[in-house]
Structures are given as C-alpha cells and as structure tokens.
Image (tube, rainbow, N blue to C red):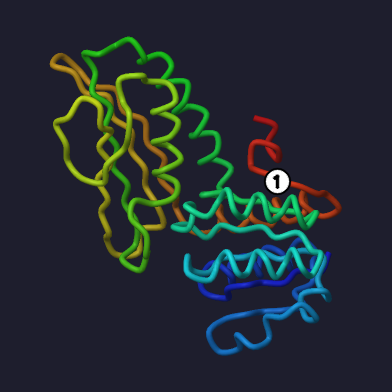
Amino acid sequence: MKIALIGYGKMGKEIEKIALDRGHEIVLKIDVTNPEDLNKVNLQKADVAIEFTIPASATANYKLCFEAGIPVVSGTTGWLEHLPEVHQLCKTMNGTFFYASNFSLGVNIFFSLNKKLAELMANRSEYKPEMTEIHHTQKLDSPSGTAITLAEGILENIPEKKTWVNHLTEKNDELEIVSLREGEVPGTHIINYDSEVDYIEITHCAKSRKGFAFGAVLAAEYSFGKKGILSMNDLLNL
C-alpha cells in the first residue's frame, strides 16, 4: 500500500517506521518545510493518507484528500467543532474518513470499559466522577481529544452530568477534567469515582507513541478500498 504522511513530526516518523516494517511504501511526506507539496496531484500517488497535523490545517487537509479520491486517516485533535461539516463533505464527495481521538488499541478498549463503568454508576449519586489527563508539554490542545471522548462516554450514561469543564468544579451537573502538561509523557488518563467511604479508579497509561502509530497504520489498512465514515469501533468490532 502507498501511504502519504501529512504531518511528519514525531508521530509521523513513528508511523513511517511501522508502515515500512509492515511492507508499505511512503510516497509523500509533508511537514513545515514543504507545504507546497501537499496538492491533489501528489496525493493521487498514494492509496491512503495518514494525517497528524494541527487543528488549524486539519479540515483543509481532509477536503484535499477527498478531492484526490483517497481515504484519509486522521488523529489530529482540537478541531471537532467542524466534525459535522467534515462528515457532510465526506458524504457529498463520496470520500473515506477515518477519525480517532486516539488510535491506541488499549485506549479504545479503555473507552468501552469507561462506558461500562459509567453505566454501573448511573444511579450511584454518592460517587462523584472526576478525570485527570497528563500529556507532554508540546501538546497544543487541552483537554486532550482522548479525555473528551472519555467525558462523552460518561455524560451519555450518567444523567446528572450535563457537560464537562476543564477545571476543578463543585457543581453537580459538571464533569471535572484536570489537564496537566509534564515532560515527555505520551498520555495518561485517569477516571476516578470518589465517595465519602471509598473510590474507584481506572487508568490508561501509554508507554510511548508506538501504540498510537501502530493503530493509525492498522486504520489505514482497514480504510483502503472502503467508503464513508469509519472509526476504531469498526476496526475493532467494539
């Protein structure tokens, strides 16, 4: 499979290693030094694009991939206010869009575990759900896309909680997310249900970027030859 890498930072380089190990070919690499190479003609040399950039450029990158007629797999976070627009554009242009806030296989299992725990705690008002996410100091968005996905899983299942906030809160209808930025931490997410007598805690801790990169390559392999909106739930059959 021929892959275009839109974004060739630390994550892009990790994706490249795994893709090459799995027998794929990298036909295009885009970073801050060659933005002019990101065009329809160059993209059409690839079977699929993997996009890890910044929120400001993400939606334009997706549109360009749709125009080139190739699937795009993206892990860029911080742009989700445009998600309905991107989904509609994908459908209108008969494109393929695979988005995940986190491509780690373990994190996506953690998403399901989080939802199940929230279901069990739905009527347990004596427990207060809280969340902490920790990432490296270069991470641009806060809270993380993964934390938002986890928060949505809680809000879907605990009627008392109406919204998430990215600060400490004592309001019963708000879900507290605390964001910390420390060193080179790849990503740690902690869900805690606290009561007067005990607490329940589940944690996912990434050891490196390799898990994210491996999942992104699997997503690219899965997307090849498909059309429409795809997700890790499709890939993992969750």
Residue matched to label 1:
229
Q: Which residue is pictured at 25% across the width and 32% down the height?
A: 174
Amino acid type at circle 1 is Ile
Q: Which residue is pictured at 31% across the width and 38% down the height?
A: 164
Where is residue 104 shown, x and y percent of the image? 55, 47
Give 129 or 18, whichever is nearer the viewer: 129
As displayed, is residue 37 above or below residue 25? below
Of all residues, the one furthest to the top in this rendering is 123
As displayed, is residue 33 above or below residue 5? below
Q: Which residue is pictured at 64% across the width and 88% down the height?
A: 36
Q: Is residue 30 left or right of residue 43?
A: left
Task: Estimate how packed mark 1 is, as few (under 14), some (14 to 19) or many (20 or more) residues with alpha carbons within 10 Å.
Answer: some
Q: Which residue is pictured at 80% across the width and 54% down the height?
A: 94
Where is residue 225 shown, x and y percent of the image? 86, 53
Where is residue 178 shown, x and y percent of the image? 24, 45
On-image quarter of the N terminus: bottom right
As displayed, is residue 31 above or below residue 128? below
Q: Is residue 5 left or right of residue 77?
A: right
Give 237 or 164, whichever is nearer the viewer: 164
Where is residue 217 shown, x and y percent of the image? 69, 57
Of all residues, the one furthest to the right in this rendering is 225
On-image quarter of the C terminus: top right
